[in-house]
Image: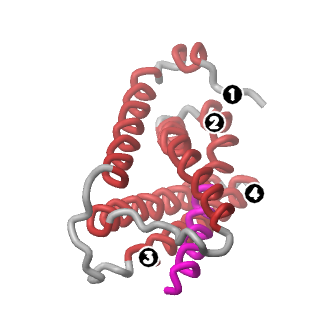
Amino acid sequence: MAVATPTSVRHSGAAPAIAVILAVSAAASLFLFWLIYIHPAAASSSQYAFLPAMNAVFNGLAAVALLIGYTFIRARKIKRHRASMITAFVFSTLFLVGYIAHHALHGDVRYPAHAAFRTFYLWLLASHIILAVLALPLVLVTFFFSLSGRIPQHRRIARWTLPLWLYVSVTGVITYVMLSLALGS
């Protein structure tokens, strides 16, 4: 299984686009870190209390679209694969917008200190966050290669992108369910 190396990326003429993707991904990650851990919440109202559940639905729908897209590509149904992957991207984007809105309005919601499975939850959440930060540029680069017709590079990186993206989508739903159960909501 070959992975795109810096030399192969440079020779494909994709280096400037990938540099922009990495810069945008880093900026987005830093913004989210600031929003969640530094910026105070705008309101403590329960007016938008539906956002976490909606975000979990978007994550779940992204996971389903990813699995359908994988099934289509294995069957060599390229157009259906592309449509499924674009659908997954749209659901993940809607999740990100809802996630930003929730944290801007309500701040961070913490898992209760004495609730069951807290250690597992924190481990799962940490892996989710770290891999989400890694998945963002991979998803964007994978889309760039596909949409620019660089199919060999797309295939090489998609082998890494799909499992990461799927893990992040599924663990997003699991962490939501665990936090909801722990909070009793």
Looking at the image, is 69 positioned above or below residue 134?
below
x 31%, y 69%: residue? 106
The location of residue 94, given as percent across then percent down, is 39, 64
Viewer-nearest of labels 1 and 3?
3
Viewer-nearest of labels 2 and 3?
3
| Corner quadrant of residue 40 | bottom left
Asked if the residue at tag 3 contacts the one at tag 2, i.e. Cβ–Cβ closer than 8 Å, the answer is no
Relative placement, left or right, of 9 versus 35 is: right
Question: Looking at the picture, which amino acid does disc 1 mark?
Answer: Val
The location of residue 149, given as percent across then percent down, is 52, 35
Q: Name the residue beneath numbered marker 2.
A: 157
Asked if the residue at tag 4 contacts the one at tag 1, i.e. Cβ–Cβ closer than 8 Å, the answer is no
Give whichever of 105, 113 is nearer the camera: 113
Marking on residue 58: none
Give whichever of 182, 19 is nearer the camera: 182
The reply to whether the magenta stretch includes residue 139 is no
What quarter of the picture does the N terminus occupy? top right
Viewer-nearest of labels 2 and 4?
2
| Region rendered in magenta | 166-185
Question: Looking at the picture, which amino acid does disc 2 mark?
Answer: Ile
Residue 163 shows in this picture: yes
Q: CA distance from mark 2 to mark 3?
A: 30 Å
Give whichever of 70, 18 is nearer the camera: 18
The reply to whether the magenta stretch includes residue 173 is yes
Q: CA distance from mark 2 to mark 1?
A: 6 Å
Q: Name the residue beneath numbered marker 3.
A: 54
Question: Looking at the picture, which amino acid does disc 3 mark?
Answer: Met
Secondary element type, mark 1: loop
Marking on residue 3: 1
Q: Dot 3: within a 10 Å radius of its alpha carbon, few (fewer than 14), some, or many (20 or more) residues?
A: some
